[in-house]
Amino acid sequence: MPDPGPSPLWPSLPTAASHALTLPTAPAVPIAPAAPAAPGSGPVAPPLTDLERILRGPSGLGTAGLSLVPRAEPPVPEKPAVPAEPAEGRPIPGLYFHPVPEPDPARVAEVSRRIKEWAVDEVDLFPEDWEGEFDGFLVGRYMVACHPDAPTVDHLMVATRLMVAENAVDDCYCEDHGGSPVGLGGRLLLAHTALDPLHTTAAYQPQWAESLHADAPRRAYRSAMEYFVRQATPSQADRYRHDMARLHLGYLAEAAWAETDHLPEVWEYLAMRQFNNFRPCPTITDTVGGYELPADLHARPDMQRILALAGNASTIVNDLYSYTKELASPGRHLNLPVVLAERESLSEKDAYLKAIEVHNDLMRDFEAEAAALAAACPVPSVLRFLRGVAVWVDGNHHWHRTNTYRYSLPDFW
Ligand SMILES: CC(C)=CCC/C(C)=C(\C)COP(=O)(O)OP(=O)(O)O
Ligand SMILES: [Mg+2]
């Protein structure tokens, strides 16, 4: 399939400039003053007003497509502090995706430095022998690719800590770092209280507070959430808690099926994967971008469908890129190609190719619905949020494609 180029969502979304002039309010208001420029956040520019900053969009490398107004002049390419690593990995043949610019290497270096410091010094996340795997996860590159409009490195760190914490829970409770389906419900519920606190009597509160330090997943959730709520509005924090409850429900269904050796129908698998899903990551794009999509706009059914489609496409990308890793893991690891092969009696290759088509349909539906909502509701915060979600989807693909430490493609071509 020929490279489809940058997301078609960009040109089809109306620019916000004219709307901003006629709207009674300027909805895409920042939720916090931008913090002082941090190392790796680019050269110091004259201060912009809040509205100018939002309408101009991000100014980092490769972010021109995020601008909501035409830029007066093309942005001067910033000289990277360290040379950009060449992107490795090849895309899956036939996969519908949009390439992204190589994430700003100075930001990547700074986020990578800070996240390691947080993991080691603040939450004691991993024993020494997991360090290589932590580094190989390349979470700094991941988050910088997914959030090019983050105003500062502090904003990026909010997303990065949550991403690490979410993966720690998945690895340590569910998967190959001591995880098991047995007893998962109890572990997940107690960890969920690090995000959605227990409110109980004075006699029992201290034991609960102490429990949040009892293991690495809970330490990570507790700390990452503490940073997040400082940056987020109450409704953004509530949105995130809801998305994480969805995620935990998905983990539980996967675990229940593993315990009973149940092989789901394809549609059942897709339903489980809609919950065991990346959704909590793109839906914080506004917090990380320093503005808020108001709760009533987030709750619109068309927005909800768009978020589900974006999360599902992103998660099937994981099924495709992690296919060989999961085949090599002990037992039967469910992913879309595996379920298609079993349930539709397809060869491994045909099942994999069909999973690509499922992904491509989800991506096209996501883009069509997002473009329709942008046309129907051209509010600046909606436009910026939709772009943020689309950029997250593209950055997620970029990270999967280039993380050759973690993923490799099957030999089907
Ligand atoms: C970051 C986040 C919210 C993750 C939640 C669920 C999750 C770990 C994925 C959607 C990734 O899928 P998977 O567990 O298959 O990950 P790997 O293939 O092991 O990378
Ligand atoms: Mg996977």
Image (cartoon, rainbow, N blue to C red):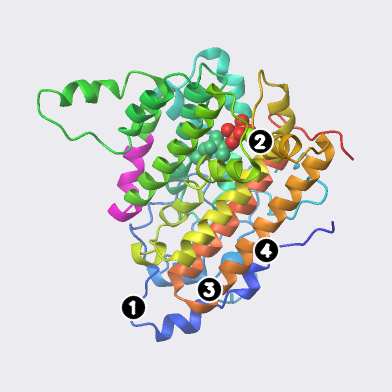
Q: Which residues are magenta?
A: 224-236
Q: Which residue is mark 1?
A: 25
Mark nearest the camera among 2 and 3 is: 2
Q: Which circle marks residue 335 in the picture? A: 2
Dot 4 crowding, Cα within 10 Å, few <14, some 14–19, many 20+? some
Q: Main secondary structure of the magenta part?
A: helix
Secondary structure type for disc 2: loop
- Dots 3, 4 in contact, CB < 8 A: no
Decide whether residue 69 is among the magenta residues.
no
Q: Is residue 305 left or right of residue 142?
A: left
Mark nearest the camera among 4 and 2 is: 2
**Amino acid residing under circle 2:** Asn
Q: Which residue is mark 3?
A: 374
Q: CA distance from mark 1 to mark 3?
A: 18 Å
- Dots 2, 3 in contact, CB < 8 A: no
Q: Is residue 203 left or right of residue 293?
A: left
* Residue labelled 2 has its Cβ within 8 Å of some atom of ligand 2: yes
Which circle's residue, 3 or 4, is located before the other in the chain? Answer: 4
Residue 314 visible in image:
yes
Q: Which circle marks residue 7 in the picture? A: 4
* Picture residue at 69% right of the left edge, 58% below the top: 361
